[in-house]
């Protein structure tokens, strides 16, 4: 459940009155998501998403995230626009917390994509990278290799072993491998960095929304494809879906020779990135917290797959 803060009807109506969007009709908390509080807002004119940024968000970074949404939407990516208030501001403050009103996009997140949907996701990701090319905002990746090492160190060997006895050795070996082989020289761009199925809205085979840009940053472009591959190409039981992989890669389009060679290493990195945050959260989320912890072992198994399959994981 991701509604950490309650907002009284009067507070909501007062907030909405600062925008040229009609009058408040209803507001419902949205249970999905883990990071921020979200409400589905209905006004006399349209639907919107109201996001309240919770403790993990550095408000100084909001202009980057919200500016990126506006830039991509203007270029034609299926990304929600930020609604600006009467004074032109992209976010406001309520009870000491930043809030933004965002365009509501239709569509549903799928659990088990079809190849046609995976192809559309690949194409939408390529479009996002193209459309972001002239975005001037800058944000470094705050969850890159050095931070994975820090997060695993914070977990401690005993903590990792409490998740799985083999995890401390797996993590130590893989960090050493990635630090020695990370392809720092590849082309860079603004990337989404978290394009999981729950961050993509689909209408049949069409991508109607790319959402949740709060990990977006400038990093290796092909790393974004590797993240997306690691998130989309496995069944719930961990089985690799070669058909989804082939469709996602075909939808994305051709990579440079260097990027294609680097994909297996980038995918191992992607698996480690999500193992790191999930393991940290697994050990540090109180039992009575409102959010459901995500299993780090899902990505330990994907890492083992990428280690074993190498380039075969990306065969056409
Ligand atoms: N622009 C949008 N249009 C439609 N639904 C949205 C939009 N933004 C968020 N949502 C809904 O809210 C949920 C949580 O949003 P998300 O940004 O993923 O939160 P979190 O950052 O906490 O994970 C999404 O799963 C989706 O159902
Ligand atoms: N995609 C990440 C979790 C990030 O949460 P989100 O709800 O903000 O996308 C994972 O699966 O570990």
Image: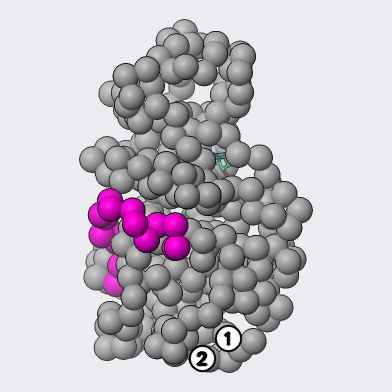
In terms of image quarters, where does ligand 1 lie?
Answer: top right
Give the magenta range: 129-145
Q: Where residue 198 appears, x then y in whole percent?
A: 58, 52
The residue carrying pointer 1 sits among few (fewer than 14), some (14 to 19) or many (20 or more) residues within 10 Å by Cα, namely many
Mark 2 and mark 1 residues within 8 Å of each other at the beta carbon: yes
Given residues 307 and 251, the one toward you in this image is 251
For residue 288: magenta? no
Residue, x 28% and y 53% (percent of image)? 136
- On residue 310, which mark appears? 2
Image quarter in which the C terminus is found: bottom right
Residue 53 sits above or below residue 225 on the image: above
**Residue 249 higher or lower than 203, as above or below:** below
Where in the figure is residue 249, as x and y percent of width and height?
59, 76
141 within the magenta span? yes
Q: Which mark is residue 45?
A: none
Could you tell me which residue is drawn at 43 percent across and 74 percent down? 222
Q: Considering depth in this image, is 201 or 181 the residue closer to the camera?
A: 201
Instruction: Give the camera-side residue of 108 and 257.
Output: 257
Return the x and y of residue 82 as percentages of the image width and height. Answer: 44, 34
How many numbered marks are there? 2
Residue 122 in sight: yes
Relative to 209, does residue 160 appear above or below in the rendering? below
Q: Is residue 107 left or right of residue 3?
A: right
Q: Which residue is mark 1?
A: 313
Residue at 56% from the left image edge and 48% from the top image edge = 78
Q: Quadrant of residue 42?
A: top right
């Amino acid at each position: 459940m991701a509604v950490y803060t309650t907002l009284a009807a009067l507070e909501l109506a007062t907030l909405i009155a600062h925008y040229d969007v009609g009058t408040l009709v209803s507001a419902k908390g949205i249970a999905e998501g883990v990071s921020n509080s979200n409400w589905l807002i209905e006004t006399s004119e349209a639907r919107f998403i109201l996001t309240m940024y919770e403790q993990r968000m550095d408000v100084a970074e909001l202009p980057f995230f919200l500016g990126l949404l506006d830039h991509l939407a203007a270029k034609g990516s299926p990304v929600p626009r930020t609604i600006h208030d009467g004074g032109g501001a992209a976010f406001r403050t309520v009870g000491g917390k930043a809030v933004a009103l965002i365009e509501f996009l239709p569509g549903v997140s799928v659990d088990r994509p079809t190849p046609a949907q995976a192809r559309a996701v690949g194409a939408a990701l390529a479009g996002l990278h193209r459309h972001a090319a002239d975005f001037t905002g800058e944000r470094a990746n705050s969850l890159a290799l050095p931070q994975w090492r820090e997060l695993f160190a914070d977990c401690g060997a005993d903590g990792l072993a409490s998740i799985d006895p083999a995890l401390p050795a797996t993590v130590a070996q893989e960090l050493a491998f990635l630090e020695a082989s990370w392809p720092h020289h590849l082309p860079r761009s603004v990337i989404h960095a978290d394009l999981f199925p729950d961050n993509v809205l689909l209408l049949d085979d069409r991508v109607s929304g790319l959402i949740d840009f709060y990990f977006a940053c400038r990093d290796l472009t092909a790393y974004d494809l590797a993240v997306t591959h690691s998130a989309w190409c496995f069944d719930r039981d961990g089985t690799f879906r070669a058909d989804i992989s082939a469709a996602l890669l075909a939808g994305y389009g051709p990579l440079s020779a260097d990027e294609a060679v680097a994909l297996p290493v980038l995918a191992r990195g992607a698996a480690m990135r999500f193992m790191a945050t999930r393991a940290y959260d697994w050990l540090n989320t109180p039992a009575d917290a409102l959010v459901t912890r995500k299993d780090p072992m899902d990505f330990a198994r994907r890492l083992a797959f990428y280690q074993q399959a190498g380039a075969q994981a990306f065969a056409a």
